[in-house]
Amino acid sequence: MKIQLERYHGLGNDYLVYDPNKNEMPLNEQNVKALCDRHTGAGADGILEGPLLDEKQMGVRIWNPDGSIAEKSGNGVRIFAKYLKDAEYVQKKQYLLRTDGGMVEIAYLNEVGSRLRISMGILCFNSSQIPVIGEPREVINEDMVFGNSLYPATCVSIGNPHCVIPMKEISKELVCKIGTHSEYARYFPERVNTEIMKVIDRNNIAIETYERGAGYTMANGTGACAAAGVAYKLGLSGNKVIVHMPGGELQIEIDENWKAYMTGEVFYVAEIRLGNEFTELLRTL
Ligand SMILES: N[C@@H](CCC[C@H](N)C(=O)O)C(=O)O
């Protein structure tokens, strides 16, 4: 039987939706890597596997292109919610979706479900929960060495781990230079997503992101929440900001309990049917 996937992107962060109710092959580290390969596979920044159904809520499993599993993805959950609407799994305008990093609350802001506001969970600065090694503490503006350079890092979890570094100027080259080291740095036992952040004014920040398990991406939804949380925590911005990324913008709002709300767009691109030879290859992995 042919394997069918759907390609979507959120601000250039592209995912393949793999629906286990329509496909039989179980996903694993090796076949996920092969599927996400941009030269020899279908190509993607990750795979969204679901809906995974239990009696109560629908769930999604988020795969990184290196075959690891991520607890949460901001662009991923917006995309997956659009898929649930497109595939007619949901009729409600608002509902809960389970991720490995906790529940998120989906709300569609338009009829076609391409604009969404999502309650992403609580921003947590506690080192043991992020996790960051050492004494339990909030990791705020700590000097960390990535490569041969020292950076002031503030770390936060929104279900998945982030390290945010405020800078005067940011670029793809710079985040890649830092991210290749920070992802595997000894501080982070579960690796880390890295965002370098430029504060434009109290209502606007810009980030470049290097994702754990994926490398450089054009946008990162949990990264946008993390950076907005850090800018607010450090007193550099208010609690509502527009986060500018190379792929586009997200609006992030943080409430009095540090719950983050993300508003933004997603786009359906294509249905993909894998060829016989590639399907056979995947089944051997
Ligand atoms: N693209 C994502 C983040 C995906 C997960 C990340 N690579 C991780 O391993 O935590 C987003 O939009 O949040």
Image (tube, helix red, strand yellow):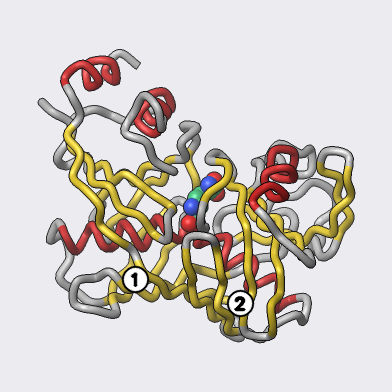
Is residue 133 visible in the rendered structure shown here? yes
Percent of width and height locating residue 153: 80, 58
* Mark 1 lies on residue: 106
Quarter of the image for the N terminus: give it.
top left
Which residue corresponds to the image point at 75% horizontal and 63% vertical from the top-left?
Answer: 169
Is residue 101 visible in the rendered structure shown here? no
Which residue corresponds to the image point at 28% horizontal and 46% vertical from the top-left?
Answer: 17
Q: How many marks?
A: 2
Percent of width and height locating residue 281: 28, 15
CA distance separating discs 1 and 2? 18 Å
Which residue corresponds to the image point at 29% horizontal and 62% vertical from the top-left?
Answer: 81
Identify the secondary structure beneath mark 2.
loop
Q: Nearer the viewer, residue 240 or 101?
A: 240
124 displayed left or right of 64? right
Residue type at numbered disc 1: Ile
Quadrant in the picture for residue 265: bottom left
Q: Which mark is residue 258?
A: 2
Q: Which mark is residue 196?
A: none
Which residue corresponds to the image point at 81% horizontal and 61% vertical from the top-left?
Answer: 137
Percent of width and height locating residue 143: 89, 55
Where 29 sits versus 262, above or below?
above
Where 283 sits versus 251, above or below?
above
